Image: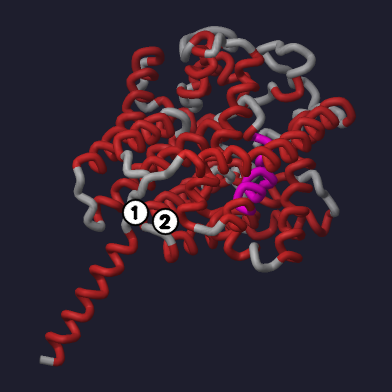
Amino acid sequence: MITRARNVDFLDGFRRWTADALIRPAPINRELLVDGLKAAALPFLVSRILVWAATWFGARNIPATPGMWSNLYPPPALSPFFHWDADAYGYIAHHGYGLGVGGLDAMVVRVAWFPFYPLLVKLAGGSDWAMIIIPNVCFFAALALLYVVAMVRMDSDRARLTLWLVALGPAAMFFSYPYTESVFLLVTVAAFFFMESGHWLLAGVAGMAAAATRFPGVLLAAAFGAEAALGNRRRAVFAALGLTIGGLVIVSLVQWAQMGDPLGYVHARAFWIGPNRNPLYLVGSFPKAVIEGDPFNPEAIGVPVLVVFAIGAVWVALRMPAAYGAFALTQVLVAFDQGLYLHIFSLVPRVVSVIFPCYFAFATLLQPRRNLQFAWLLVSASAMVLLSAMYGAWRFIG
């Protein structure tokens, strides 16, 4: 009898846990959306002014890496922002993945970049201005929606702090460059916004867009899968999961049609593998930069940032619905895999900057600790300004 009673208690506890682990959709009113727009305005403006000013300063005052230029030839007002990946996205927007400027090798390497952002650029007219306006508009919209999602899970103080943490993150300058970070952030936050409001099919459409923006977008399927695994067996949830995977299928079909390789985005990774290194560089990169007094070593912060986000992802997995935890944990694992596979961790701050559930953990930790909150934002914003200036001088690719 005692054993049976314990089994009943365990099953009741498990049922309560699975019920709490599921997202319970509720209507989101228009007033909260308006509040989101208002809350996003100041973090957006302050952070973007810092990014724009620092990027321009770096382009004008830091000696550029020799031999670097943009094949897009943007107007002078935009040229500091059109470096590195921006060339690839601009080329895809105008020509797709076909052979063109740069020859065969350049064509193959371009397959590493996904087509959704270039498609948006093309739909907006294909100009250089469209390439820079779209990320900034998407970032503002992402902050507004993030505030709404945060308010579902937290109070207004922590929700507002979340926006500042995102906007002043070490790699937050990429939300204003012709890269995919802001588009990716918008569609992933939108997926959770629609989940929280019960619009599962729209969440799936957002998941499809995320998977067509960057490979980690397909990991929204883990969020939908967590819902299904814990008991949400509605057809719309499975449809959302299928739509998300469908986004990656579409990318494969596009690259197969234009390049003859449906797995081009996988094979293209081989072009970016760095030289073999002692694995201990992961531990030593930050102390080495400190000892040498080298603030211009962007790789030094890669591992510390990854560790912080890993801790945040664990907090999310323990404290929030399973969909949030599944998304955060899988995103952190992909960031670690990319750094390990490519033998370089300077890209990690950019890759993890879009894992928005982790910022809920950071905001919860920092909100009651004003001094720590100020120190965190100051250090983070300083890193963002420094890396923005280095990007403007072709000295940081992210």
User: Quadrant location of the C terminus?
Assistant: top right
Horizontal placement of 242 versus 121: left or right? left
Q: Provide residue 258's location: percent of width, then percent of height.
A: 39, 13
User: Is residue 168 shown in magenta?
Assistant: yes
Q: Residue furthest bottom?
A: 2
The secondary structure making up most of the magenta span is helix
State the residue in front, 63 or 32. 32
Choose between 342 and 20: the one closer to the eye: 20
Q: Is residue 148 left or right of residue 391?
A: left
Is residue 185 visible from the viewing direction of this image? yes
Residue at 36%, 16% in the rendered image? 260
Q: Position of residue 300 (x, y in %)?
A: 71, 51
The crowd level at tag 2 (other Cα within 10 Å; few <14, some 14-19, many 20+) is: many
> Which residue is labeled 2 in the image?
325
Read off the magenta span.
161-174
Secondary structure state at the residue bearing disc 2:
helix
According to the image, what is the colour scheme of the structure? secondary structure
Q: State yes or no: residue 369 in magenta.
A: no
Is residue 390 visible to the viewer in this orientation of the structure?
A: no
Element on which disc 1 rests: loop
Amino acid type at circle 1 is Ile
